[in-house]
Image (cartoon, grey):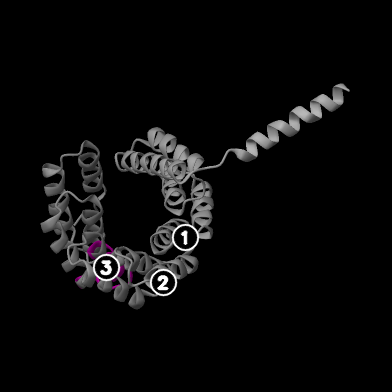
Amino acid sequence: MKYYYRLVALTSLLTLAACVTTTPQDTAHRDKLASLHYQIGVDALGKGLLPKAFDELMESDSIRPDQPEVLDALAYAWLMRGDMAKSESYYLKALRQGGGAATQNNYASLLNRLNRYEEAEKAARTALNDPRYSNQDLAFINLGNAMAGQKNYPAAIDAFRQALQFNPANNLANLRLADTYAAAGDLLQAQALYEALIQSQPQSRDTVAGLVQVLLAQHKIDDAQRYLNHFSKQSESVADRAWSIEQINRLPTP
């Protein structure tokens, strides 16, 4: 008899549960809440507030699971945390859930970091297959990095030039173009690009470092020292000033 009562009670609970339905208003409220947590998480990511970003993005994912944009943001958060494997797992999950060109491009960037250049090329080209993707210049940069990683310098140069056609003010594309000319052995072209870049971004250590290497390869030691001295005097970063002084001390004797 006790078993019968328990069975009746359980059946009643199941019947009540079946009667509880999710209304369109409930769904709309859930979606709005998930979107709010996502936006706060992305804002925290942009400010480098990783714990806050993880908290908000994970909350968004728990409210409305498997949204590609949320998974993409979590992938980037794990990348910032330094966990490449976790980052890749989230990018792949985002792609399985319908992530588009932006996620393909972000995944290409990660693959370049992992030196998996052929896979990065494929992901970047997939992103570029969508003409609606707004950040075409970034996809061409990732494609250029992938081609440079495979030592296909002419294709890399073409990709970086394409990036500049979409966004002439993209200094990263110009820097990577200069790096690629240097890697290809066209030192004069690389020097001209580095020197032009320094005019627009005088505090870029990467630009100065690239130029110094090109000058040293041409045995222009005095010019290298001049640029390093100027960088050390005008840099606002203590770490950059220390780096430039260290580089000066390492210069060979003219």
Residue 177's disc is 3
| Distance from the alpha carbon under mark 3 to that under mark 1 | 18 Å
Labelled pair 1, 2 in contact (Cβ < 8 Å) = no
Query: Toward which corner of the image does residue 152 lie, by quadrant?
Result: bottom left
Query: Can you give x and y, in whole percent of width and height, for residue 226 in the image?
Result: 12, 53
Quarter of the image with the C terminus is bottom left
**Disc 2 residue type (three-letter):** Arg
Q: Of tags 1 and 2, which is closer to the observer? A: 2
Examine the residues drawn in magenta and state their main secondary structure: helix
- Please give the range of residues in magenta: 174-188
- Whichever of labels 1 and 2 marks the residue nearer the N terminus, that label is 1
State the residue position of label 1.
115
The answer to whether residue 58 is left or right of residue 2 is left
Residue 211's disc is none
Labelled pair 3, 1 in contact (Cβ < 8 Å) = no
Mark 3 surroundings: few (<14), some (14-19) or many (≥20) residues within 10 A:
many
| Distance from the alpha carbon under mark 1 to that under mark 2 | 17 Å
Q: Residue at x 35, y 41 (%)?
A: 45
The answer to whether residue 111 is left or right of residue 102 is right
Mark 1 surroundings: few (<14), some (14-19) or many (≥20) residues within 10 A:
some
| Distance from the alpha carbon under mark 3 to that under mark 2 | 19 Å
- Whichever of labels 3 and 2 marks the residue nearer the N terminus, that label is 2
As rendered, which of 203 and 43 lies closer to the eye?
43
**Disc 1 residue type (three-letter):** Asn
- Label 3: which secondary element: helix
As rendered, which of 198 and 249 lies closer to the eye?
198
Could you tell me how many numbered marks the image carries? 3
Quarter of the image with the N terminus is top right
Vertical placement of residue 146 versus 73, above or below: below
Q: Residue at x 47, y 60 (%)?
A: 115
